[in-house]
Amino acid sequence: MKIGILCYPTYGGSGVVATELGLELANRGHVVHFISYSKPMRLNVGFSDNLFFHKVEMASYPLFDFPLYSIALASRIVEVAKFNGLDLVHAHYAIPHATSAYLAREIINDEVLKKKKNGNNIKIITTLHGTDITLTGLEISFLPTLKFSIQKSDGVTAVSEFLKIKTQSQFEIQKDIRVIPNFINLNIYKKLDNKETQCFKDRICRKNEKIIVHTSNFRPLKRVEDVIRVFKLVRDKVPSKLLLIGDGPDRSNCEYLAKDLGVDSDVIFYGEQESFIELLSIADLFILPSQSESFGLSALEAMACGVPVISSNAGGLPELNLHGETGYIAEIGDVNKMADYAVKLLTDPNIYRIFSENALERATNLFSSEKIIPQYEKYYEEVLSK
Ligand code: GMT
């Protein structure tokens, strides 16, 4: 198949999933064209003759107070589709990608009609990722357009059952939505057990210390301050270090909080990192206390490295993290409960070993690329044959 992928190129779950999906599809012989305003972060593989990137160029003019990205993207989709004979366009994160894809399809169909040709009948598939439905999509300035664009997509997928139900109820969308969960490449995400990681661990902590990890974009809905509060309670009982990866609006608050709580000497802020498999390889526990989380890709990355997860019960997290099996789940904001669970896991080697094995097993059995990519391929074929 010839597939166009629309995504945000920056750090962030939807862009990561879109890029990894494109790479996996290209590996399976499909021709993949990424279309975005800059090259997706994870598209840093060597040369491949079935993987293309098309930059959306933005015209500026004094009259345009705001960049008109959605229109520029639609025009670029039209070009890429025509010049490369795309079968389908897969929009990741509905705003504005589903809308630009819809517009592009209208333009293509109109041209085809005028030339009285048999059209290539390009299809649009939209994947809903989370805040496009639970937060930004609810903005009154986006809502009617978003709802329309989702309804006009030829196929719609959601990354969790939670997100599917939320979309159907919140937007009163009757359309069938296919749940295709996020996935992980287990050849890349696996615990590294080598000299380098051992040296790294020795540099960071003493022999008896445990390592707790959190990664996110430090936005308020990630509740990273809860991570620091949980860590304070845990460190009072178990010698440990907290490693934080990522950056965003709440980072400064978290740095101040760590200082105020007197734990700053045991908290390391790494900022944004290209890869954190090295960190996950030395981690004992991963914490994700989000206010809202449609899936929780970072928790899956931890599980793939055999790291149990302490999470909130937000959104789709309980579909990924099984309470009492791969980790523990507490109410949003219940830092005491999260700390109790963390201490329980970190101080009982038997329970810990079982949870660690369960986490890896669940990632392997349900969320590996091998299991999920064929689901996308099958869905593409279904939509193309409609
Ligand atoms: O909203 C974000 O935090 C970023 C967002 C994105 O689309 O970049 O992440 C969402 O999509 C990820 C990939 O599908 C999911 O793993 C995240 O759970 C989801 N975030 C939220 O729902 C808050």
Image (spheres, grey):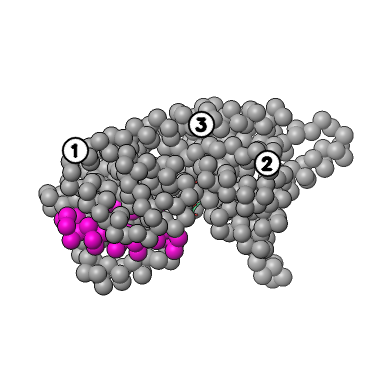
Say left or right for 157 vs 20: right
Range drawn in magenta: 212-240
As helix, strand or loop, the secondary structure at mark 3 comes to helix
Of mark 1 and mark 3, the one earlier in the sequence is 1
| Residue closer to the observer: 187 or 308 | 308
| Residue closer to the observer: 211 or 310 | 310
Q: Is residue 305 visible?
A: no
| Residue closer to the observer: 341 or 262 | 341
Of mark 2 and mark 3, the one earlier in the sequence is 2
Residue placed at 33% from the left, 66% from the top? 254
Q: Position of residue 352 (x, y in %)?
A: 23, 41
Q: Nearer the viewer, mark 1 or mark 3?
A: 1
Labelled pair 2, 3 in contact (Cβ < 8 Å): no
Residue occupied by mark 3 = 373
Q: Amino acid at mark 1?
A: Asn
Crowd around label 2: few <14 · some 14–19 · many ≥20 (10 Å): some
Q: Position of residue 243 (x, y in %)?
A: 28, 55
| Figure quadrant of the C terminus | top right
Q: Which mark is residue 350?
A: 1
Instruction: Work out how far the residue at label 2 is from the one at label 3, CA to CA, in angstroms.
Output: 23 Å
Instruction: Work out how far the residue at label 2 is from the one at label 1, CA to CA, in angstroms.
Output: 46 Å
Question: Total marks drawn?
Answer: 3
| Figure quadrant of the N terminus | top right
Residue occupied by mark 2 = 175
Q: Amino acid at mark 3?
A: Ile
As helix, strand or loop, the secondary structure at mark 2 comes to loop
Name the image quarter holding residue 291.
bottom left
Q: Position of residue 59 (x, y in %)?
A: 67, 60
Crowd around label 3: few <14 · some 14–19 · many ≥20 (10 Å): many
Of mark 2 and mark 1, the one earlier in the sequence is 2
Instruction: Please say whether residue 280 is one of the residues in the magenta stretch.
Output: no
Q: Is residue 229 visible?
A: yes
